Amino acid sequence: MEEGVIEFYLDSGSGLSPYQQIVQQVRHALRLGLLREGDQMPKVKDVAAQLAINPNTVLKAYRELENTGLVSARPGVGTFVSATLPGVTPAVLGPLRRDLRRWIAKARLAGLDDEGITALIADTFRETTTEDIA
């Protein structure tokens, strides 16, 4: 399988530690189908160099993912995705992603910055139920 199918990034404003951000990004990639069972994770040293963080931070994230059964380390070979998370198919995600991009563009045109958009989404998410679907 292809190595490096995920590219990590750090958001200093997220409120999460770097290792937690790595774990979260892997979980999101699994849920969205961007990572699949058998995919090789980027090498620890490559992630550490890319993000300019200590390799032990990446190891901690990979260990947590391994403890939850999502990845498995193969000594001398690398770390591989060993399980997926429930998600939906790319055919379902595509239209939703397009709609969301349009909505985000409208929100920015209305004057919301990234933090405002995130706050509005989080607030609306908490208030929305499946009964709201019309």
Image (spheres, grey):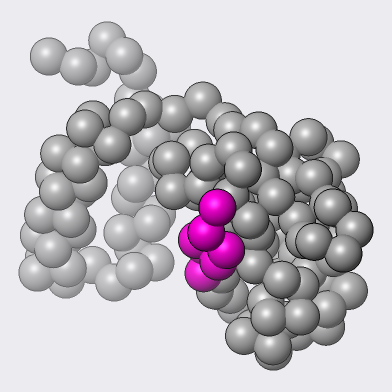
Nearer to me, 117 or 81: 81
Task: Kindly indicate the quadrant of the structure image that contains residue 49.
Answer: bottom right
Magenta span dominant secondary structure? loop
Nearer to me, 79 or 109: 79
Name the residue: 70% across, 50% down.
80
Name the residue: 80% across, 36% down.
68
Above/below status of 30 relative to 112: above
Residue 1 percent across, percent down from the top left: 55, 52
* Residue 107 within the magenta-colored segment of the rendering: no
Residue 126 percent across, percent down from the top left: 43, 32
Above/below status of 97 relative to 22: above
Above/below status of 107 relative to 38: below
Residue 55 percent across, percent down from the top left: 83, 78
Name the residue: 35% across, 18% down.
129
Task: Kindly indicate the quadrant of the structure image that contains residue 66.
Answer: top right
Residue numbers of the magenta segment: 1-7
* Residue 3 within the magenta-colored segment of the rendering: yes
Residue 46 percent across, percent down from the top left: 68, 80
Nearer to me, 120 or 78: 78
Q: Please identify the quadrant where the C terminus is shown.
A: top left
Judged left or right of residue 111, residue 48 is right
Name the residue: 36% across, 27% down.
88
